[in-house]
Amino acid sequence: MDKVMSNKWIITLYILPALLFIAVLIVIPLLLSGYFGLMDWDGIGAMQFIGLDNYITAMQDSKFWESTLHSFLLAIFSALSLLLYLVVALILASKIKGANFLKKIYLIPMLLSSVAIAQLWIKVYNPSNGMLNSILTSLGVENPPAWLADPNIVLYAIFIPIIWQYAGFYILIYYAALKNIPESIIEAAKIDGASPIQIAIRIKFPLIMTVFKVTIVLAIVGSLKYFDLIYVMTGGGPNGASEVMASYMYKLAFSSYDFGYGSAIGFLLLIITLIVTFIIRKATETKDTIQY
Amino acid sequence: MKMKKAFTVLTFVLICCLLMVACSGEEDENSASGDSKTVKFMHLWPEGSSAQHYKVVNQIIEDFETENEGIDIELEVLSNEQYKEKIKVQSTSNELPDVGMTWAAGYMEPFVDGNMFASLDDILEEDNLSEEFVAGTTDAFSIDDTAYGLPLELNISSIYYNKAIFDEYGLEEPTTLDEFNQVVDTLNENDVIPVALGNRDAWTGSMWYMYLANRLGGDEDVLTSAIDRSGSFEDPALLKAAEHLQGLVNDNSFVSGFNGLADQEAKSMFMESQAAMYLIATWDLPNYTTNEDVPQEFRDSVGYFPFPQVDGSGDFNSYVGGPGVGLFVSENSEVKEEAKTFVSYFVKEWGERAVTEVGIIPATKIDGEALDLPELYVEVLDDLNNASNITLYADVQMSASAAQVHLDMIQALFGGEITPEEFVKTHEETLANEE
């Protein structure tokens, strides 16, 4: 049996289907979108090769930069909210009453589809009879904001459900990592007289650092290509105030029928995400790994 | 050793299976059906969301198949957004259905330019079919005087209002913008939302702007000529319309937060009697007449009035509206003749059935008197017969990318983010760039 599995031909044969799938479903479309980005094409008629024109247009397109800025703002917010998730996970992991119940509560948003979450929050944000403004009015606020209609607020109003949506996922990861820390280390610290906060900052956090780094990459890359909730809740509006890179790409390709330009934006999105990932990996690189 | 052999054989079988699955996708479908020909028809009225439409389409297909031996109709039904995406993918790979649905003007232009749609002039001439259509409706589906689609629906927009609310506060249908403003003031004083508007779908806000432009423009259709470039978007009437629109917003005419509301949400506000007025097109008529799911009490209390005159100018018989979807025949279809026979049959049959069974207004002429219809319906049909002008929806007139700019600008104008001057300037620049 071992002999068979070490046969190079057999190995190749077994990997081949997966490789084919990756090539057909991921690599080829990626290359194609880069190729379409070089075309003037409405997605229907004949393609016309225009070189790097689409990419040059993108560089001068204020809407593209605006949506890129929004994507980065989302990335920063998501990265910051990781600290919040971590605090929650630390509390949950420290043997409080009802931790299991709370864990399940936090997981609920993960079980809902993005569209359902969007519909839920649209109701919450409804300016005249939504939950949020009803509470504000009863508290005596005279003109509560129209959350999804105000261009200065809409972006942050959408960040909140996104952060809420992923809370369970990250809390679960941290919780699992924290539970992996050997009890003896914590006991030793306690005997040395460390306070719970000191234990959390000096011992637990460093010990799950590798996990934390992974989640930073996940959160930032996920934010840069984020699309669904924004598309359903505002469609990028009003007037582009909540447009992110992915929704702008979709709008160009499928609403404005500028498939070439949309593909170019998609390819730029890929490049930007790759660069950011690379930078984060470099910045958080450490040689020595902690061993329990 | 035996094990190894068995394993290699197993692997071989596995690979063969994979290859077979990969290759079995394409089968020749035409050869199987013998003498009869199959016309593939794709439409966007699924049973779930458009039960009446769906039923009538099926009846027409059934009747067609009995009357035309040897032609089978193969049906595919998708919902609106899915339809739009699928048709786009199919056109890219040259696999459009033989008969399908398209929107007018700007939407279908790329398809016509790409040589995807067949000319339907021959069916229009045959049996004088063109006489059957309401004047102007086929024009919206024509490019360079060739028809590439036959319209199925005709819509005009009016302001629908809640008679019960109007009665409660002693209000009457306004005929001028000043009267309209007074109505709004009274409603605001009594804490009733005057107008439901879901401007997240900016085409609804666009209708308000179009009507203001239409009324201020007088007899000439300034908006249409600005878009087709025989005129300019810097026409004083178009600027003035933008100013009036912001005036309406500043007077709190619309529900607060309209830029964040979808049309569906605005509609439900109107239908739950939370808002007094709602500007929408006749495709919504069933909700106010025949739809059994809507309480009878509410249906009885809905009336409508034409958009008021503005600054003493404007013709009540001039409407904002246009044909909805129409049928096209694919240029590359292998059964083009049969497809055309079907299309011609379909539009003829659709006319009366659309009114009596679906409750929408078809693009073909019908005699409202002869049919037993709800009162509101007869009024609308009357208005349509007397219409002096129908200005086609701006976002339909424009190319897809210009329409996107228009819709964004509408949201910005409503939201007070830009001045009326910037509004007309951006439009003029966008349209001039496309020439």
Image (tube, rainbow, N blue to C red):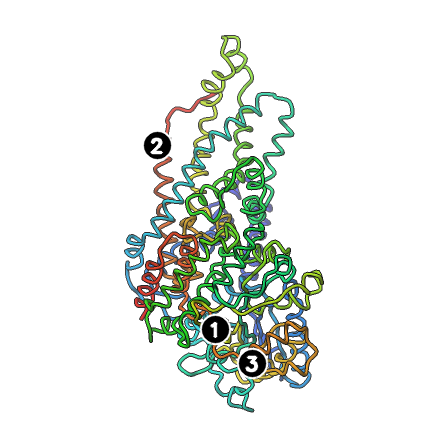
Where's residue A103, x and y in %? 61, 31
Tag 3 secondary structure: helix
> Are circles 3 and 2 on residues that touch, CB within 8 Å?
no
Q: CA distance from mark 3 to mark 1?
A: 21 Å
Are the residues under marks 2 and 1 on the same chain? no
Q: Position of residue B395 (x, y in %)?
A: 44, 66
Task: List the single residue furthest toward the top.
Answer: A192
Q: In the image, what residue type sits under mark 2?
A: Ala
- Quadrant assignment for the N terminus of chain B: top right
Residue where numbered disc 1 is placed: B104
Structural crowding at the residue carrying mark 3, measured as other residues with C-alpha within 10 Å and reported as few (<14), some (14–19) or many (≥20): some
Q: Secondary structure at mark 2?
A: helix
Q: Secondary structure at mark 1?
A: loop
Q: Which residue is mark 2?
A: A283
The residue lying toward the viewer, choosing from B217 and B429, is: B217
Alpha-carbon neighbours of circle 2 within 10 Å: few (<14), some, or many (≥20)?
few
Say whether mark 1 and mark 3 are on the same chain.
Answer: yes
Looking at the rendered structure, which numbered label has been put on residue B385? Answer: 3
